[in-house]
Image (tube, helix red, strand yellow):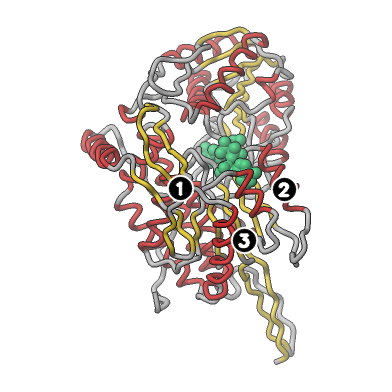
Amino acid sequence: MTTTPNTAVKPYANEPFTDFGKQENIDAMQAAIAKVKSEFGRSYPLRVGGRKIETEAKITSINPGNVDEVIGFVSKASQEIAEEAMQAALLAFETWKKVPARERAEYLFKAASLMRERKHEFSALMLLESGKNYVEADVDTAEAIDFLEFYAREMIRLSTVNESQPLAKIPGEDNHLSYIPLGVGVIIPPWNFPLAICVGMTAAAVVSGNAVLLKPASTTPVIAHKFVALMEEVGLPAGVINYIPGSGAEVGDYLTTHPKTRFISFTGSKEVGLHINKLAADTVPGQIWIKRVIAEMGGKDGIVVDETADLDAAASAIVASAFGFQGQKCSAGSRAIIVESVYDEVAERVVKLTEQLRIGLPEHNFASGPVIDNVSYARILDYIEIGKAEGTLLTGGSKAEGNGYYIQPTVFGDVGGKARIMQEEIFGPVLALAKAKDWQDAIAMYNDTEFGLTGSYFSSDEDRIAEALDTVHCGNLYINRKCTGALVGVHPFGGFNMSGTDSKAGGHDYLLLFTQAKLMSRKA
Ligand SMILES: NC(=O)c1ccc[n+]([C@@H]2O[C@H](COP(=O)([O-])OP(=O)(O)OC[C@H]3O[C@@H](n4cnc5c(N)ncnc54)[C@H](O)[C@@H]3O)[C@@H](O)[C@H]2O)c1
Ligand SMILES: N[C@@H](CCC=O)C(=O)O
């Protein structure tokens, strides 16, 4: 790309979701699934400084809904290759940081446009690799497109004099503040939004002028590879994104402690986030900066329902929030805290709706699919056993049929606020219902957690809603709606306390995390 267009950019708007009520859209998704399946079992190389590297060691990516199907074999980086990737990124950074912001943004616009054209192909691969159903995969792809479109515009805004931070004027000086990139960063996304979050984290860093080492989650490396190949197709210079799947402990720790790593952008569990934060805080010989850690971590999200609420709407939102993508969202509403006078009524409706969820293969678009892998499967089944001792099993409670990691959507009733299933992130299809004396007690129970990511409050009482807006402590608080499904640019996303470093993905301040502000003052 050689020229910087001067044309105005259309205002940002969210990518529309596909209407799977229409047969033509179901047909299009099924055709895309067939195409992806015809490509099963291929090998995917690492991409370092524009070179494709095949390694003997491979990550085998499988379909969690049918464990006999291999999505692909992905080359696996060692520490030596991670070092090569670091050197390639350091080299690329020297030229990439000088590319005008508008030109950098154009790569994202182009990628968004191609992803939109091929959206079912991206969704189909994601569905087969992660176990999402049609709607969940489509929403994930739409969010990826949104991130590309949104951060591209944000970089243009940030680089426009006087738009990002107007400075007060004084006589005799011209002053200007510019947001410059940080350097080389490590991007570590989770598997649960294997396209959207991977794209969002990478695009934000790159459009800000940084070069990155992308280490995708080991369960979903093929969809991440498809994104990296797309960025190559739109002509992103070699070395700006280096794709290096590998072990967290080996490659991850190596890069986190590397003296040339300037920042680490991580989304994942509390445990790994804290580990990275601790390692990154240590300075090592040759390091001349304090590493920046952006960590978006887990949640123990919940829905509070008082006796004035629309109980049908509340029950539907509880079920959607708890069981969408099998509860494998950081925003999943795995707790519902209900005022005792309406508890039985809400619990009954929740159980009824949960029992209507059909379980089966994602490619056949069942409401509930598998969980991601054998480790999650075992952990969630353990939590179900813990739940049996902590509450009353109302529905579900065991594994489900299928040649994959299927678990019945499970609801426990009468769970105490301090129970483990009310306090710990399970990240699976397990919902705990708790009884509160009144609405204030319910809010206090909601707040009794180390996390603070998403929450919902259901009520029709305006005074209580005003109080809830003030006192429910979480990064994304919703009133009378589910606690999942944040939209880029509409609901900037990220939480408090052990949910992370208080960043807001899809918000106007997000790119500041990938830049540093340089003030330039000149005597007039
Ligand atoms: N706050 C958010 O926006 C958000 C969004 C999505 C998921 N999450 C959280 O992510 C978790 C689920 O994702 P997960 O199972 O992939 O999380 P995880 O913490 O197990 O892994 C996240 C990523 O870290 C990598 N990793 C593991 N050990 C590492 C190490 N030592 N050094 C560097 N990288 C390492 C993994 O390979 C993966 O890519 C849940 O806790 C969920 O709440 C949070
Ligand atoms: N942003 C998503 C959650 C991302 C984490 O898993 C939501 O709002 O549901």
Residue 508 picture location, percent across and down: 58, 57
Query: On the image, numbered disc 2 is attached to which residue?
Result: 277
Q: Amino acid at mark 2?
A: Asn
State the residue at coordinates (61%, 32%): 455
Instruction: Examine the image and state in which quarter residue 211 appears.
Output: bottom right
Upstream in sequence: badge 2 or badge 3: 2
Say which residue label 3 marks: 514
Q: Secondary structure at mark 1?
A: loop
**Image quarter (top left, top right, bottom left or bottom right) of the C terminus:** bottom right
Residue lying farthest to the front in this orientation: 56
Give the alpha-carbon distance from disc 2 to disc 1, as whole Å. Answer: 31 Å
The residues bearing labels 1 and 3 have C-alpha atoms spaced at a distance of 34 Å
Q: Earlier in the sequence, mark 1 or mark 3?
A: 1
Q: Is 306 situated left or right of 228 in this image? A: right
Kind of residue sitting beneath label 1: Glu
Which element is circle 2 on?
helix
Kindly identify the residue that appears in the image at 38 percent across and 36 percent down: 127
Image coords of residue 350 (percent x, y): 51, 15
Foreground: 31 or 186? 186
- Crowdedness of circle 1 by 10 Å Cα count: few (<14), some, many (20+)? few
- How many residues crowd mark 3 within 10 Å: few (<14), some (14–19), many (20+)? many
